[in-house]
Amino acid sequence: MRTPGDILLLSSYELGHSPQHLAAPLAFFERAGYAPRAIDLSLDALDEDAVRAAALVCIAVQMHTALRLGIAVAKKVRALAPTAKICFFGLYAPLYADALHAEGLADRCLGGEHEEALVAYAEELDSGRTGADGVTLERLLFPTPRRDSLPLVSRYAHLVTSDGNRHAGYVEASRGCLHTCRHCPIPAVYDGRFFIMPIDTVLADIDAQVAAGARHITFGDPDFWNGPRHGMALVRRLAARHPGVSFDVTIKVEHLLRHAGDLAELQALGCAFVVSAFESRSERVLSILDKGHTRADLDRALDLTDRVGLPIRPTFVPFTPWTTLADYADLLDWIGARDLEGRVDPIQLAVRLLVPPGSLLLRIPEGAVFGALDPERLTHVWTHADARMEGLEAQVFSRVEQAGHESATETFAALRDIVASIEGTTAKRFVPVRTAAPRLSEPWFCCAEPSARQLGALAPKV
């Protein structure tokens, strides 16, 4: 199989970023002597001739939306190349292995630190050996990801600031997570483990993307401060190596509080914003999710980062089986009172809790609210005990979808009107003081469920 085109790597969606889950496997395959072809289907059409010529087609499914789209890709591959082997790989592959095998869409499902397992599967097909699905949780020797055959950085998400836009690159300094938040799919695969990437390897990847035009770098780690010394050493070297190149990171609330002394330096080194999973202001919801922070901690984190001029862009899961109407109204009003409307993408107020197979939520008494796995939506089903919340969720999602190019202030005002009409109260009004914080042009998030409209807009070009 060591000829060009025998192996085809496909990615359908990675949040508008240059796909790490094509770039990393490309490097592993090439180091092993293979010459795979890679196509990012979020930007380019599926090459049907390439599918027909492939003996092995590997489909990246690192997040929920990618899995939804990846299944459509696999069906197309099966139709075009019935004898080709299909391997799903990435975080969601082992979680949904049973369902993918049952549908006849997967011959192999690989997760965790999966790159060497992908190469091993190709070698099995070369030799006639047989293997099995699996999750690899051991440190790999990483070559520098290969992006030279992928689309130009200018075609991907960019940083939006008051001073203009910047092309944005993407890297990962670590994978997995030390924490076991129950609603997150990562603990179901990594079980509280994480693996750091060698700093020189990450910097070499950044070098290549900066040379290709990137002036901003997104660090896609689940939590950049799982290894705070590693993370800070990396961004210090980034700032010294590429002055003026900004970056963004994702950091848990508890880590922002624990390592508050590093926040000023993080900002000075060029951090444009921090994404942080606030999730909820309900103490009950935070406890069930095992988030490791309280509602008071949210204000403390904001105060600390505001003090050093480092914007937080919070993410939320506002619709859970345990969220009340009062909880939702409180969250909306708190966002206004904290002057966060320019820092929260309105879609964050429409996110519904997704529960994949293996979720830690299924292991606790509160998980009794979850039903069977929906084979189309790919989540264990649940409904609110309060029917008003189901109606509110539908109205909010519809309103956010229709927001178009209106300001976040207008959208949030409309959401408060929806809540007030259900409560029979008068909506509060807030006047933003701060300018909007820098953001990426792609507003979607990894744990969000795509709507029918978004699935159409993001559908892989097959």
Image (cartoon, rainbow, N blue to C red):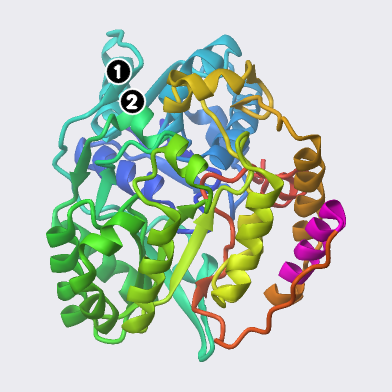
Q: In this view, does 32 lie above or below 23?
A: above
Q: In this view, does 239 lie to the left or right of 379?
A: left
The circle drawn on residue 126 is 1
- Using the rendered image of the protein, determine whether residue 212 is visible from the camera's viewpoint: no
Q: What residue type is labelled 1?
A: Asp
Q: Is residue 268 left or right of residue 184?
A: left
| Foreground of the two, 16 or 368 | 368
Task: Report if residue 211 lies within the magenta region.
Answer: no
Residue where numbered disc 2 is placed: 1
The residue most toward the bottom is 163
Which image quadrant: the C terminus? Answer: top right
Residue bounds of the magenta highlight: 411-424
Q: In this view, does 122 lie above or below 298?
A: above
Picture quarter containing residue 182? top left
State if disc 2 and disc 1 touch (CB < 8 Å). yes
- Earlier sequence position, callout 1 versus callout 2: 2
Q: How far apart are marks 1 and 2 (CA)?
A: 6 Å
Q: Residue at x 57, y 63 (%)?
A: 442
Q: Is mark 1 on a helix, strand or loop?
A: helix
Which image quadrant: the N terminus? Answer: top left
- Using the rendered image of the protein, determine whether residue 314 is visible from the camera's viewpoint: yes
Badge count? 2
Q: Which amino acid does label 2 sit on?
A: Met
Q: Which residue is drawn at 69% across and 57% down?
A: 329
Q: Residue at x 24, y 80 (%)?
A: 264
The x and y percentages for residue 172 are 30, 54
Q: Is mark 2 on a helix, strand or loop?
A: loop
Task: Report if residue 423 lies within the magenta region.
Answer: yes
The x and y percentages for residue 251 are 33, 59
| Foreground of the two, 7 or 216 | 216
Q: Residue at x 38, y 60 (%)?
A: 297
The residue most toward the front is 425
